[in-house]
Image (spheres, helix red, strand yellow):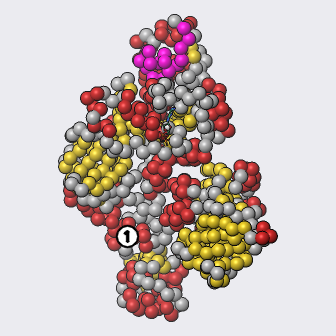
Amino acid sequence: MSKIRVHALAKELGISSKDLIEKLESLEIEVVNHMSTIGEKEQELVKNSLKPSVEKVEKKEEDSSKNSNNKEKNKTNKSDKKDNKKNKKSKAGKKEEKKELEVGDDIIISLNSPITVKEFAEEIEKPLAQVITKLIGLGIMASQNEALDEDTCILLADEFGVEVEFKEPEAEKTIEEKLGLDFEDKESQLKSRPPVVTVMGHVDHGKTSLLDYIKNSHVTTSEAGGITQHIGAYTVNVDGKKVTFLDTPGHEAFTSMRLRGAQITDIAILVVAADDGVMPQTIEAISHAKSAGVPIIVAINKMDKPTANMDRVKQELIENGLMPEEWGGDTIMVPVSAKTGEGISDLLDMIQLVAEMQELKANPNRKAIGTVIEARLDKGKGPMATILVQKGTLRLGDSVVSGVSSGRIRAMTDDKNREIKKAGPSMPAVILGLSEVPNSGELIYAVEDDKVAREIADTNRASIREERIHAHTKVSLENLFDRIKEGEMKELNIVVKGDVKGSVEAVNQSLLKITNEEVKINIIHSGAGGINESDISLASASNAIVVGFNVRPNINAIELAKVEDVDVRTYRVIYDIINDIETAAKGMLEPTIVEEIQGRAEVRQTFRLPGNRVIAGVYVLNGKLPRNSMVKVLRDDIVIHEGPISSLKRFKDDVKELATGYEGGMTLDKFNDIKEGDFFESYILKEVKKD
Ligand code: GDP
């Protein structure tokens, strides 16, 4: 016998590492965690003490501690969900709620807020045309589907001689929550379930190779044929225990799921190439996993390469907040090679270990709730969806509903393309029979019968329509104060991007110095470089604003920010950032001068004139380039210059502007460091008044 690690001994003894650690503690043998080593003498002690009579007593204690642990877990899960679903409002039941209160002789009509012009007309029982006319009289041009604010409603009601009041907004619940489909299970009904693992990391660090290696090496020959198909998730057997891998590597998929309110990952594997080290997407992945509260296991990959340098990688990981276990931290780091397979079984052991510590459980004996991992329309078979079951058991023939899609499961296969009749917690299954392709990330519920499924889908459709009409609720500097006031916000989450590392740190430090009684600043991610889609999706998933210092969002990020309604603010002076946030928190944001973007052009060629003047041959990608606008010169989304245009020509002629799809030549005022591949972003300054 020699020294042995805690987790290995636990395995040998057939108990969990957690139990073993407790046992060791009770024997006053000091260990830090499951990676600690135990000497021979201590091993003897433990083995002797594991006599059956002792075990019984211990077990009771352990059970009760498990109970309390789980309760806590349930709680956090629940509040997570609430946040995610904040936006969803259902129209169901709205009609019944409409009631008229009598106060003396006057009738007060009680309204839901927000309310559209049309709904308002219906509620006060006046013709829509009259309401619109009265609105025009009040100087408000609004169409029937536009939302009215409360003050306007009161004014308007007054015009009609009626009195209105606003209902307290009801607790925001989805229709499924209202129907009680997602009830809590009793502790005694819970059974262990396999962990669900997502692989993240920088491009080319070996995420796909790692997933492929695991897929190919851990599937028995009889299953091997089927698993080559991609369904978005697969399950492997590790020493008789199952692990489910999400087969879409990268944090984009992870975050887009989170955006839709699905948090299905239990463990994140962060792949870092040993010959390349920590790169921008590695840092992004760390932020994404941390902000979702998912434990990280690092796989230091490509150890077979002669240039592999594990210590350097570890050093860089420490700089980014991940301390290796063997150096006293709590992040497991496993050297692997997706090429030779070295270390991969250790990695799988570690996944089991972390899963064991998390005590993942679900009740298999109830109607299923799952998440749509992937979905598509198959020409022959109709809508196909890969479901990852979270609770309960999904069965062939079940009536299901996911968002606006409903139906009865008429065929079901597993990840190896075998026909199955049921799928339990953490198991992926491909189902056929839905009425339309559901959204990935959307929850799916098994319900009583087809009729119920269809009704829920219809209600969801109606509430989506309503959501589109009604106002958004993402945080922005404009609404920050109101949200603090309403007690909705205690923390302001911020994603910080800057041109260089030094400036990012300076911005972070200044932000953290903001002392405001009302709101605490929380920097959830920061880094050097332009603002990209990942920043926006992280901000959206975490309800954060994005602050850019000397950097700009790229086109995709601008588009996504619009769709996700994320407030992106860019600055050139740190003082302005701090000032804006401080004043916003106090509700005193001044009317601001904003830059209204006109368009973007790419520099395709440059010509040098005598006297070192440089003409840029540009192509307008979108919007327009007006002669009198200002221009930001962007190199890798970093602003390297900003100033007026000094000449704008199309062929030989001076022009007032260049439109999308046109080429032209331009020179900038007092700036000649223009290179091919730079972008020009044109903007005009506009004052926005606060109302
Ligand atoms: P991803 O972008 O993170 O999914 O990375 P890939 O899995 O596509 O791998 C990128 C490249 O690295 C491919 O050419 C792989 O063959 C190679 N690669 C991945 N893992 C290893 C490894 O462990 N050792 C070596 N030598 N090459 C690897």
Which quarter of the rendered picture does the C terminus lie within?
Answer: bottom right
Is residue 312 visible to the viewer in this orientation of the structure?
A: yes
Residue 286 horizontal/vertical position (percent)? 57, 43
Asked which quadrant contains residue 283, the reply is: top right
The reply to whether the magenta stretch includes residue 6 is yes
Q: Which SS class for mark 1?
A: helix
Q: Say which residue label 1 marks.
A: 465
Q: Is 2 situated above or below 369?
A: above
Which residue is situated farthest in the right direction here? 611
- Viewer-proximal residue, 511 or 92? 511
The reply to whether the magenta stretch includes residue 31 is no
Q: Say left or right for 462 vs 295.
A: left
Q: Is 180 situated above or below 653?
A: above
Residue 443 horizontal/vertical position (percent)? 36, 52
Is residue 388 visible to the viewer in this orientation of the structure?
A: no
Residue 257 horizontal/vertical position (percent)? 44, 51
Residue at x 61% of width, y 18% of height? 30
Number of residues whose C-alpha sits closer than 10 Å to that of mark 1, classed few (under 14), some (14–19) or many (20 or more): few
**Residue extent of the magenta highlight:** 2-17
